[in-house]
């Protein structure tokens, strides 16, 4: 799993994957009860700012997740090391020098917010531009 996927999962939550029954498993009852389907919750209903603000309120330290990729990564429990930010830069297509510069970090933060929005999260325009 990539760094962006880890960030997205930490904010959106992981979707449960239903196990498919094995084709060769013998039937032990005539009509097993089918599990109730999970409620259909659209990812677009996820308010990224509300989730991150709530997490920040309980973080125990001030984190400027609204503009800092390092603080955003800390907030969602991902090591913000330069190596992880380099990997995130590669995943998201950053073409500049991957040296941890302010330019790279600002680009990463905005790119993560854009990707969260592209994946259905509600993100205000001022965090993606």
Image (cartoon, grey):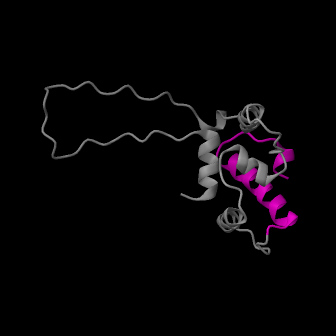
On screen, 87 above or below 57? below
Residue 37 in percent (x, y) is at 41, 28
Q: For this view, does 129 lie left or right of residue 79?
A: right
Q: Nearer the viewer, residue 52 or 75?
A: 75
Residue 65 in percent (x, y) is at 80, 45
The image quadrant that residue 124 belongs to is top right
The image quadrant that residue 121 belongs to is top right
On screen, 23 above or below 51? below
Main SS of the magenta segment? helix
**Is residue 126 part of the magenta span, yes or no?**
yes
**Is residue 81 part of the magenta span, yes or no?**
no
Q: Which residue is pictured at 75% across the width and 48% down the height?
A: 72
Q: For this view, does 15 lie left or right of residue 45?
A: left
The image quadrant that residue 60 belongs to is top right
Q: Nearer the viewer, residue 57 or 67?
A: 57
Residue 90 in percent (x, y) is at 67, 68
Q: Which residue is pictured at 26% across the width and 24% down the height?
A: 33
On screen, 19 above or below 93? above
Q: Nearer the viewer, residue 43 or 69?
A: 69
Which residues fall within the magenta stretch?
A: 100-129
Q: For this view, does 110 lie left or right of residue 24?
A: right
On screen, 30 above or below 122? above
Q: Which residue is pictured at 45% across the width and 29% down the height?
A: 38
Q: How many marks?
A: 0
Q: Check the image and name the residue furthest to the front.
A: 60
């Amino acid at each position: 799993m990539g760094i962006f996927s880890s960030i997205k999962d930490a904010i959106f939550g992981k979707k449960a994957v239903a196990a498919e029954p094995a084709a060769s498993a013998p039937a032990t009852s005539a009509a097993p009860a089918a599990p109730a389907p999970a409620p259909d919750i659209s990812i677009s209903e996820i308010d990224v700012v509300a989730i991150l603000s709530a997490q920040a309120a309980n973080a125990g330290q001030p984190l400027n997740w609204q503009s800092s990729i390092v603080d955003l990564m800390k907030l969602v429990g991902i090591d913000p090391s330069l190596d992880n930010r380099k990997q995130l830069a590669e995943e998201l297509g950053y073409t500049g020098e991957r040296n941890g510069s302010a330019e790279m970090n600002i680009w990463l933060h905005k790119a993560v917010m854009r990707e969260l929005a592209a994946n259905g999260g509600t993100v205000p325009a001022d965090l993606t531009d």
